[in-house]
Amino acid sequence: MSNKIPAVHLVNEGAYLLERTWGGSYEVDGMKLPSSGAVVQDITKVFKVTERRGELLHYADADGSRLTSGDYEDKKTELLAASTEIDDGRIFTDLESEFAWRKFSERWKPVFAPNVIERTPIEVEISEVRTTSGDADITSLWNAPSVHSDSRLYQVMRDGVTARTLREMCAKAELPLDIPTHSGIRFAQISGNYAFSDEFDFKGLPYIGTLAQCKAEKDRVVDAVTRVVRVHIAKKEGTPLRGVAQVILQLRAVQSNLSGVRPKQDTGGSLIAARKAVNEIIESLEKQI
């Protein structure tokens, strides 16, 4: 087993995170290292502190009289000669011998030199290298210092980003919102209606890419959620549709394309539903002109 202490190299900060997953006592810059670990700039200033009892000097009684350790051992051997050692103690041949030993051991107490404190430098093993992204939603993966900054990999959890964006927008617009505890926002309901398609099913997995790619993906999903919520806000506030005539023309083009599609056995129901939905949208918009 390695005696090296695991550390996380925080590249941008020029520091090391020592995560306390080990025992013992440590000091950094003369201060005790907390049990939760610490961030240090210079690992050469971190020492393991070991304290051991000082050597036995002699024995002494309450009056200050002394016995050398040799004399104490000789007397101890003499007094214990009238006893037999057993698992949980000693058995003496008579009460007088037992009393003499107890009186002797209670009188003479060991005196030690001051405890010896040793400070030894630690050995560090880099278990992870992190860089900061500047964005709380984007975290660094394991990237060695030698990896160019443009090639370092990061990750962004889209479920968390989209859920927070959705909650904030709905709260501000006072729109009723229900987000299940599973599947991210895929089955979230706004004002009692399912609002999102499979596009928002991220399956709880992170998006992994360069910093630029992660930022672009975060912006994309935030924009996608924003566009959905804005439609519900417009519906609530009765916002009139601008350019309605152009929208109708575009929908009629879709309607024409759908009418030329031949249904298959497994898609016929979906095609009929799509045609009906487009027809209803066109009729609804035509009433606004």
Image (cartoon, rainbow, N blue to C red):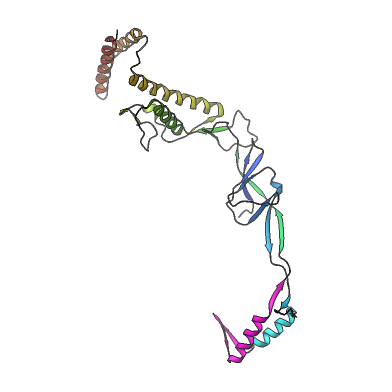
What residue is drawn where x is 34% and y is 19%? 237
Residue 226: image x %, image y %?
42, 23
Does the stretch in magenta take in 31?
no
Q: Residue at x 28, y 12 (%)?
A: 282
**Where in the figure is residue 177, as x and y percent of width and height?**
35, 31
In this view, 129 is above or below 210: below
Q: x%, y% of residue 104? A: 66, 84
Q: Is residue 236 above or below residue 7?
A: above
Which span is picked out in magenta?
83-112
Decide which of 33, 103 is in the foreground and name it: 103
Q: Is residue 105 magenta?
A: yes
Q: Is 222 rendered above or below residue 34?
A: above
Quarter of the image with the N terminus in it: bottom right
Image check: 224 left or right of 49? left
Q: Eyeballing the image, is 196 above or below 60?
A: above
Q: Nearer the viewer, residue 29 or 123?
A: 29
Residue at the farthest front position: 63
In the picture, the quarter occupied by the C terminus is top left
Q: Position of residue 66 (x, y in %)?
A: 75, 79
Of residues 209 and 53, the one drawn nearer to the viewer in this rendering: 53
Visible residue check, residue 93: no
Indicate left or right for 44 with 168 as reference.
right
The part of the image, by quadrant, that contains residue 84 is bottom right
Q: Give the total of numbered labels.
A: 0
Image point (59%, 54%), residue name: 22
Residue 169 visible at all: yes
